[in-house]
Amino acid sequence: METFLSNLSLGFSVALGLQNLGLAFLGCLVGTLIGVLPGVGPVATIAMLLPITFSLDPTGSLIMLAGIYYGAQYGGSTTAILVNIPGEATSVVTAIDGHEMAKKGRAGAALAVAALGSFFAGSVATLVIAALGAPLTKIALMFGATEYFSLMIMGLVLAVVLAGGSVLKAVAMILVGILLSTVGTDLETGDERMTFGLIFLSDGIDFAVLAMGIFGVAEIMRNLAQPESRDVVRKPIGRLLPNREELRQSWAPVVRGTVMGSILGILPGNGAVLAPFASYAMEKKLAKDPTRFGKGAIEGVAGPESANNAGAQTSFIPLLTLGIPGNAVMALMVGAMTIQGIIPGPQVMTGNPSLFWGMIASMWVGNLMLLVINLPMVGLWVRLLKVPYRLMFPAILAFCCIGIYSINSLPTDVMFIGLFGFVGYLLIKCGFEPAPLLLGFVLGKLMEENMRRALILSRGSLSTFITEPISAGLLLVSVVLLAAAIIPNVRKGRDEMFVE
C-alpha cells in the first residue's frame, strides 16, 4: 500500500507540472471538440496531431494524446444527445435514450448524468490501472521473445474476434498491415524489401503517414461523400443538474457500467467499444419496466456512458504493462512512443517510472478537467454543431498536409497520405475495417524482431513456440478464439447454401 501511494505521489508530481497540466487541458479540449463535431473521431484526430507531439517531451506528448482520446468519449455523448448523431462509435447507444430525453426538454439532465457518470467511471478506472499496473508489469518481465511473439498473435486474434463485420476481412487487413510493416531495409541483412528501387521507401513506410492517410484523409473523404443531415434539438436544454429522482435512477447503472467497462476495456481488440453496448443490454434486462428504454430512460444514458469512459481508460492497461495495443487508438500511442524512442512494454514502468505514473495520474486530472469543460460550455458546443462540414474539412486537410510535411520535409509524404487516404476510403466502401490494418502494421515489426530473437535462441527450432508453457498457452487460447469466431460463420454459410 505504501509503494502504491508513493507511486501515485510521483505521478501527481509529474501530472501537476505546469506544462503537463496545460497539455492535458489542451488534449481534453481538442478531444471534446472532436467528439462534439460528428465525422472526425479520436483515431483520425490523433493521427493528424502526431507531428505536433514530436517537438514535445515523451510524457507531455502521451498525456496530450490520452486527453484527446478520453475527451472524445465525453464529447461524443454531447452530439449523441443533442443531435442524435454519435460523435464517436462508443456513443451510439447514448443517442437512443439521450436524444429522446432532449426532445422532452431534459437534455441538461442527460448531459449532466453523462458527465458525472463518466467522471466517476474515469476516476475508478484510473485506480484500477494504478492497482493492476505493478503486478502485470512483474508478470510481463517474465516474458521472453517467444512469449512476446505468442502474446502479439493473441492480441491480433482478439482484434479479429472483436472486430465488427467479416472475420475473413479482418484477418486480411491484419495480414496487409504486417506486409506493409516489412517494407524497407532489413536491419539484419541490409537487403531492401519491397522498395521497388524507390529511395524514399528504403527506410520503410512512415507510421504517421500511414495513420494520417488511412484514418484522417479517408475519414474526410467518407464524410464528404455522405449527405449532411442534423436533427439539432430545438427545445431548451433545461437545468444542468439532475433532480433527486434522476440521481436515484442513475447511481446503480453508473456503478454497474463502471465495473463492466473496466473489465471489457482491458481486453485487447475492441473491448472498450463493446462496453457501452453490453451495459445498455444489461440495464434493459434489469429494469422493472424495459419498455421505458428507447423513450428517454435515464439509465440508458448513465450506464453506457460510464462503461464507455471506464473502457476507454482501462484499454491503456495492455499498452502500459505489456506493450500490446488493444485498439487503433492504442496502436497510435505505440507509434507515438516509438517515435519518441520509448519501447512499449514492462520496461517503461521500471526504466521510466515518471512517464508511467505521470500518465496514470494525468487521467484523473483530465477527467476533472473534462467535467469542468463539458457542462459550462454546452451552449458553445450547440453552436459548433451548426457549422457545415464543407467549411471544416478543407481546413483539416490543409492542416494534415502541413503537419506531415513538417516531419521529414518530403513532398512524397504528402503524396502518400493522399494515396493511403484513397485506399482507406475504398476499404471502408468495400466493408473493410482499417483499424486491424494499423494494428498489424504496428505489431508487425515487433513480431518480426521477437520471432527472430526466439529462433536465434532456439537455434532455428520452431518448436520453441509450443515447448515453452506460457507461449503454448497463449497460442492455444488464440486458436480457440479464432475457431470460435470462424465456425459460426462457416455453419451459417452452409445453412444458407442448403436453403438455396
Image (cartoon, rainbow, N blue to C red):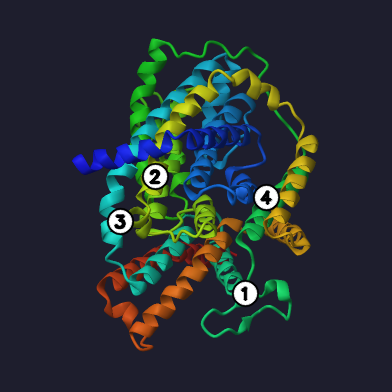
Q: Position of residue 75 (x, y in %)?
A: 56, 31
Residue on which the image places disc 1: 183
Camera-side residue: 401 or 374? 401
**The residue under label 4 is which amino acid type?**
Gly
Image quadrant assignment for residue 175: bottom right
Crowd tier of the residue under label 1, counting other residues whose Cα lies within 10 Å: few below 14, some 14–19, many 20 or above: some
Query: Quick one: quadrant of the N terminus?
Result: top left
Kindly report which numbered mark, 1 or 4, lies closer to the viewer in this rendering. 1
Q: Name which residue lies at 58% across and 39% down.
A: 88
Q: Position of residue 141 (x, y in %)?
A: 29, 63
What separation in Å lies between label 1 and label 3 (alpha carbons)?
32 Å
Q: Are marks 4 and 3 in contact (CB under 8 Å)?
A: no
Q: Earlier in the sequence, mark 2 or mark 3?
A: 3
Is 386 displayed left or right of 271 in the figure?
Answer: right
**The residue under label 2 is which amino acid type?**
Thr
Q: Are marks 2 and 1 in contact (CB under 8 Å)?
A: no
Residue on which the image places disc 2: 314
Kindly report which numbered mark, 2 or 1, lies closer to the viewer in this rendering. 1
Q: Name which residue lies at 65% across and 52% down.
A: 215
Q: Assign a secondary structure to mark 4.
A: helix
Can I make out residue 125 in this image? no
Kindly report which numbered mark, 2 or 3, lies closer to the viewer in this rendering. 3
Can I make out residue 420 in this image? yes
Residue on which the image places disc 4: 216
Q: Is residue 276 above or below residue 186?
A: above
What separation in Å lies between label 1 and label 4 (alpha carbons)?
22 Å
Residue on which the image places disc 3: 137
Q: Position of residue 111 (x, y in %)?
A: 52, 22
Q: Earlier in the sequence, mark 2 or mark 1?
A: 1
